[in-house]
Image (spheres, grey):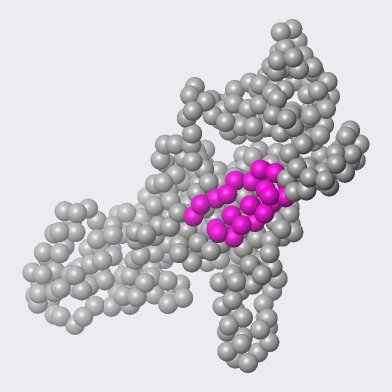
Amino acid sequence: MATSVRILTGITPSGTPHLGNYAGAIRPAVAASRQPGTESFYFLADYHALIKVQDPARVQRSTLEIAATWLACGLDPDRVWFYRQSDIPEIPELTWFLTCVAGKGLLNRAHAYKAAVDANTAQGEDPDAGVTAGLYLYPVLMAADILAFKAQKVPVGRDQVQHIEMARDFAARFNHLYGEHLVLPEAVVEEQVATLPGLDGRKMSKSYDNTIPLFAPPAQLKKSIAGIVTDSRAPGEPKDPDASHLFTLYRAFASETEAAEMHAALRGGLAWGEAKQALFERLDGHLAPMRERYEALMAKPDDLEATLQAGAAKARAIATPLLRELRAAVGIRPLAVAGMARRETDATEAPGRGAARKLPGFKQYREADGRFHFKLVDAEGRVLVQGEAQASPREAGALIARLKVGAAALDCAAEGVLRLADQPVGRLGEGVELAEVREALAALATPD
Ligand code: TRP
């Protein structure tokens, strides 16, 4: 069975991207999104931004800039899932389900919260002074981001590993209570993250105020580069490239040959001014085509909005059916669904997952033919419907979503072929009656 790995990355829109973000995060992520056998999810975590940024104009501006940056750097929205967190209402809904299984004690130990408490304590303040519930629940929202899409891998920096562990913990608790619905994600720690030095030689970071903006106009780029700190060796004096962060920056954007040439030139006495000019040309050459795309995107926020809306629809084709399944699993479901209330009572004798196991469900998988298959199975695992294979997981998800709300319109032609609005959607399982399929779908559907 051909499989693909689902990878998910959240980007908090809280500032303007700089060269360090590009080299350390954007460039490698865009390259990774082109790997075969991967399904990449990239989203703008604007709900997360609200925890830190309470300036509405800045939230909007940063969302626009970051969306434009990722697209300008080559992220292909047709190939990946690219969306804005706040366009996916399933995320806050799942956040609540997870909040109700998340251990408060575990959240007490989350780094960001603990750091705030420690700082307050050190200053003799109330431990929770100035701490919002948003900061406290940050890991739950992040878990919902990941679990809503059944992501398997989450590339993160070391500081975020704890959050992925928490997402696993919440998912495991949920599954233990309600059955195997959620996929436990894994953190992928990038050991080799390219960190660029900033103007002063420390790591390029907004908090050090030493950044080179990614898409500043050439004149401003030149001015930034002029501000790179060098030693005071005069033109003609040999320089030590390996002790120079100007050279480190150059190398990050040059071929090996070009880097070797610059290395030799500096040792041979190239003036810092000339080296800066060479760095400017290198960077400008590298960034200019992307900057042009960036400016075009920034000039048309309507188009960007449309791209994000299309991305949200594509993402919701996955999250909507999952949340429908989860609502039913936790007991938020139509009151009239036959047998449900009774079964729940039985379940008191077999606590835990027993109750949830009794639900029918859809299973999606990919076969060697490269197509995306699905089936509807009953509570005991018997195949009720073998679905019509689809070209993409999105189409399979969309068809499942239609089936879940379309039970009444389903009909069965000769030979067990099921149709929905005259379109073949699958076949009945061995010895299965259409009525059983309708009942199973009704059990899964919840009113919107
Ligand atoms: N917390 C992440 C950061 O600050 C951003 C983020 C939000 C995220 N949700 C996520 C990252 C889900 C990975 C997966 O960098």
Residue drawn where x is 69% and y is 74% of the image? 132
Residue 175 is inside the magenta segment: yes
For the C terminus, the image quarter is top right
Q: Which quarter of the figure has residue 376?
A: top right
The secondary structure that most of the magenta stretch takes on is helix
Residue in view at x 59 percent, y 26 percent: 373
x%, y% of residue 15?
A: 52, 66
Q: Decide which of 170, 76 is in the foreground and name it.
A: 170
Q: Is residue 35 visible?
A: yes
Q: Which residues are magenta?
A: 164-187
Question: Total of numbered circles in the picture?
Answer: 0
Quarter of the image holding residue 402? top right
Answer with the quarter of the image where residue 333 lies: top right
Q: Residue 5 location in percent, x, y?
A: 49, 41
Residue at 39% x, 53% y is 27
Q: Residue furthest top?
A: 414
Taking the image as shown, residue 247 lies to the left or right of residue 142, namely left
35 lies above or below 29: above
Residue drawn at (69%, 41%), measured in percent from left and top?
322
**Would residue 230 appear left or right of 35 to someone viewing this image?**
left
369 with respect to 387 (left or right): left
Closer to us: 63 or 222: 63
Could you say which is closer to the camera, residue 19 or residue 135? Answer: 135
Q: Residue 133 in magenta? A: no
Q: Position of residue 231 (x, y in %)?
A: 21, 80
Name the residue furthest front: 349
Pinpoint residue 230: horizontal percent, then vertical percent: 24, 78
Q: Nearer the viewer, residue 194 or 245?
A: 194
